[in-house]
Each structure stands twice: as C-alpha cells, then as structure tokens.
Image (cartoon, helix red, strand yellow):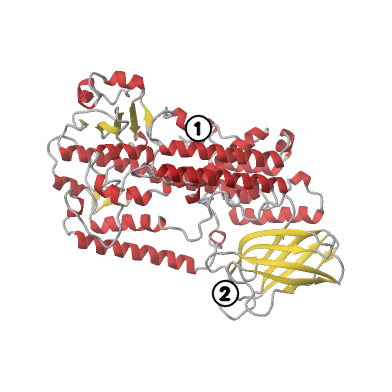
Amino acid sequence: MAVYNVKVSTGDRAYAGTSDYLYITLIGAKGESQRTLLDNWGKDLTRGKTRSYSVQSSQPLGDLLLLKVEMDPLQLLPEDQWFCSKIVVTTPEGDVVLFPCHQWVSRGDVVELRGGPALKLFEETHPVLLEHRRKELELRKQSFGSDHHPCMVKLAALFTIGPTETFCLYSLTINLYEHKYIHTLHLISSSHKMYTTDCKIQVICVFPEHSMEHWKDDDFYGFQFLNGVNPNVIRCCSQLPAHFPVTEQMVKPFLQEGSSLHMEMEKGNVFLCDYKTLDGIPCRDYNGKKLTVAAGLCLLYKNPKDELRPIAIQLQQQPSEENPIFLPSDGETDWLLAKLFIKNSDSIQHQSVHHLLNTHLVVQGFALATLRNLPSIHPLYKLMARAHAETTYSSLFLPENIAARGLQSVPNFYYRDDGLKLWHIVQSFAKEMVDIYYPSDNNVSRDSELQDWIEDIYTNTFLENGRSGIPQEFLKVEELAKFVTMVIFTASAKHAAVHNGQFDYIGWIPNNPMMLCRPPPSTKGRSSMETLLETLPNQATTAKLLSPICNVCQEVEDLVPLGSYPERFGEPLSRLNLAAFQGDLAYLSEEITKRNSELLLPYEYLNPAQIENSVVS
C-alpha cells in the first residue's frame, strides 16, 4: 500500500470555503489512487486554511500526471461552491508536486489539475498528458468560443466565477450608493447651489475635496490633462491645426511677457487636446431632447512657473461665427462653460476609449485568446493567468506613446515618470521569463499553441486590422517578450492609471462631467451662472452617475497586487525572476511614496502597491 500526503489549500477570499463533499483522485504513469473523500475531524475546507489528508493506492503510481477534484452532485442542502487555491502532494518517495488550481469548483464539476514544470506542446511526451492538453483546450473553446465576435462568450461560462451572493451584494451596493447620493444632494440644495463657488457644504457623503475647491482654477484644469484620469489625449503642439485659427493677438496676454505663440511652440511649451474622434457621434435623448457632445480643441500653455493652463478653446471642429474661440479673458461663465464642455468630451473619451476599449476590452481579448489557445501547463498561460481602427501597435507601448506625443520633457508629469519606471520593470521581468521558456527563436516559431494565440488576438481582438501593426505571428524571442510586456502593463498599470483616480476627479461632477444637458454655447456674452447650472445634470441624474463611480472606487478587500502569481511557477529560475520583479516593484513603491509625501496633490495611481495584478483577475 502506497500512501500519499495531500495538502489542500482553500483560497483566502469571500465565500471560498465549503461544507460540500469533495473527492480527489491521483493519476500517475502506473495507475490511479482510490477516490478519496476529503474528510478530517472538524470543519475541512475553510477560507484561507490548509488541511492535510492521506490518499492511498494499492501500488506506487509512478510519476504523478494529474490530480482529479470532484464535488459530489447529489447533496440536499443548497450548493456551497469552493475556491481551491492549490494542492500539494508528497509521494512515498519524498517527491513534492505542486498542483496549482486557483478556481471555483461547483457541484458536479470534475476538475483535472496538472503539476510539474511549464511545457510547450512540442515538449510534451506522455500520451495521457497530450490528451489532457487537447481536451482542456477543446472544453475552453466550447465555453469561450468567439462565435464570430470577440465578446460573444457563453453566459454559463462567464458567470461561473463564484457564489451568486457576490452579484446580489454588488447590486445592493450600487442601489445604496445611489440612494445615499440622492439623499445628500437633496440636503445640499434643491436649486443646484451645490455648484456655486462660495457655498461651503457639510455633507453626509464624502466628495473629493480638492476637486470641489479647485474645479474652476485654470492651473488645476491643466494639471488634470497630465495627471488626472485621462493623461492619454494631450500632446505637444508645434503647429496649430488649420481648423483651429488661434491668433497671436488672442493669446498674447496669457504668454510670458515679450514672447509669442510661435516662439512658445518652438520651445515645446504649447500643447493640444483634440477630441475629433467624437465629431458626429450620435447622442441619446434626455428628457425629450437630444444631448450634444462638443468635439472640441483645447490649447494649453506651460508658463514659466511650470503651470499648464488652458489659453484657447474651440468647441467644434470647424470654425465659424457660431463656433467662437473662447479665451480666459472672456466672461467668467463663458470661460467656465467652454472648459466644462471640453472636460465632458474628455470624460466621454476617457471612459469609452481609454478605459473601456483600450484596457477592459483589449485585455478581455487577450484573456479569451489565452483560454482558447493555451492550456494551463503552457508557460505563457502561467504568466498571464492573472494577467479598432485607430489603435496602433506602437500606441500600446508607453515609451513609444509618450515620445509620439512629444511629452518626454514636460515637468510634473507623474503619470509618465511612474509609468515609464513601471514599464521597464515589467519589461525586464517579461524578458527574463520568456528567455527561460524560449531559449531560441526556433522555440518560438515551433510553438503552435503560441501561434494560434497571437492569430486569435489579431483576428478577434484587433479585427484583422493590418494597418495597426499588430503581429499575426511570432518568429523571434524578442518579439514575444515585447508583446508580453505590453499585455502585462495594459492589464495592470495602464488600467490603474485610468481607473484608480476616478473618484478623485469625477466624484465632483462640475470638475469632470460625464453628461451635460444643454448644447455647447455658440456665442459669447450671453451666459450666466444660471446657464451653467442648467447645463449640469440635476440631482437625481448626478446621483445615478456617481453611484457606480463610488462603487468601483471603493478599496478592494481582496486586492491582488501587481507581481502576484501565487504558486504558478515551480521552476527555480522562474521563482528567482519573480522574486526580483516583486523586489523592484517594492522599491518603486517606496520611491513613489516618498515623492508623494512632498507633493501638495500626490499622484498615487501607479504606485505598485495599489495596482491590481490584472483587470481580469
């Protein structure tokens, strides 16, 4: 009789434990163990705990190939799903084999786990493991097939992510926040006085204090284009677009004395935000009227104090008498309205393009391609398990993106400073990891699963857009390492930059309005504070806009920080590289924390300690 010691770890997350009956079976090169019930004295599978069990076999099983986990489907009590973190088996010969799991197990499920080092398909030799590899991908493709559209995932597969209570709590939280904000806004005022300058408000809900106090200030307005939730639009302007006829006379009062717009452009001190992608987009109705969006342009100037300030705004793409250029010297409410419409455009582009499309949907495409084409034993799957007409390959790489927008030397650009340091840390980690598993270009080109993966991404995520520069195949180790760097950074840091600051800047609607209720002004000198208040959404709409922002920006109790790949890598070199990666991240975190302690308005969104490992974690 051969006895195997089995240590079973339950994940440390909400509802991870279970009281249902779990069975395991060990499968080796020389046979299978008995089907064993995990049943010790007391409660067995509890959150965050590891329990030891004995599994017996009539004879030694040889090399362990698979471990089968089953949850008894024939139980009378309500289903109690289980989140398995890992299972570690010690053989009678003293060998220790890690079987990573990190997934939910439901009644009737039969989950087969693989242990051992990461292997590419052409390195696989045992017929049982080859067949397991084939079946794993076949099942994944059935569950996560593209069905001719990258987002068409079967709902049954999509929602097997955990207990249903999670969704009930989420909906309840949304409703509670919405109710709380409506109640608070009614307490503040019934006539929009909440948005006036001099009103000092004591409220039940917490609003972002700095945005509340400084939303009208031009220097804070400009600061947000660099370090707010959307640092992706601004670029250095060396020549004005022909359809933005700003003259020297218009902006001379706002430039350094004795200078000119031309001179400042040559120095690299003039910047442009252009929202042309919003031109002509259809808008929905609101209270029986069609909403409008300003596809405007905003010119900004970095003054000798290194403050970035707006100096000219045009609210539509084509100049005309009904589309004047607004200036800081115009009436207070004219200038505020112009800035408001630009920020509304920025908010729409931020949420739809830079947040939803360029992080969530792109990363979803990477994740689905991974599930469909890379089995769990594949080295790239292990690395990423936590892991478009105008989108170009180069725009997805932060160093190239920053350079293309001419922002290499702009002062006080903390998104760039922290982002580039993070990029190079991720790049070093990805390169070392890829080099471990792909020692030569031949290893890359021979990996058929890897080639299927990139072809899936090219086809279903980037819709076969050849002009984008997205690769259709990998031929070199260097190409693969570059792509993996981009995927890790996009799923973690890039998402954090456009997500983590939402409450700070969007939590006060006048600072970053997601919706405006009147058309953009077409003339100067006819606005008032009443016009501005009528343009902003009312209290009920404001509450509906803010409630999801507040919900998603709550502190995450079970945050998995960047660099966390729990128990996925068993190979010594991989573990050393991962440890070095985590050390580099910790050092950068300390550096950012120290820098922020000296800033009036800290930039915390790319602190590795606050970045989730992946938007699809």
Please indicate whether residue 130 sits to the left or right of residue 599 in the image: right
Q: Residue 79 carries which label?
A: 2
Residue located beneath label 1 in the image:
399
- What residue lies at 24% left-to-right and 52% top-to-bottom? 537
Please indicate whether residue 262 sits to the left or right of residue 372 in the image: left
Q: Position of residue 611 (x, y in %)?
A: 49, 49
* Mark 1, other Cα within 10 Å: few <14 / some 14–19 / many ≥20: some
- What residue lies at 30% left-to-right and 43% top-to-bottom? 344
Q: What residue type is labelled 2?
A: Glu
Mark 1: which secondary structure?
helix
Q: What residue type is labelled 1?
A: Pro
- What residue lies at 62% left-to-right and 79% top-to-bottom? 75
* Mark 2, other Cα within 10 Å: few <14 / some 14–19 / many ≥20: some
Please indicate whether residue 112 sits to the left or right of residue 542 in the image: right
Counting the numbered discs, the total is: 2
Mark 2: which secondary structure?
loop
Q: Position of residue 472 (x, y in %)?
A: 61, 35
Q: Using the image, determine if residue 397 lies above or below residue 84.
A: above
Picture quadrant where residue 63 is located: bottom right
**358, 584: nearer the viewer:** 584
Location of the C terminus by quadrant is bottom right
| Separation (CA) of disc 1 from disc 2 | 49 Å
Q: Using the image, determine if residue 374 lies above or below residue 266.
A: below
- What residue lies at 46% left-to-right and 65% top-to-bottom? 167
Q: Where is residue 511 in the image (x, y as percent from the top left)?
A: 28, 46
Q: Which of marks 1 and 2 is in front?
A: 1
Q: Can residue 239 be seen in this view?
A: no
**285, 342: nearer the viewer:** 342
Please indicate whether residue 68 sits to the left or right of residue 468 in the image: right
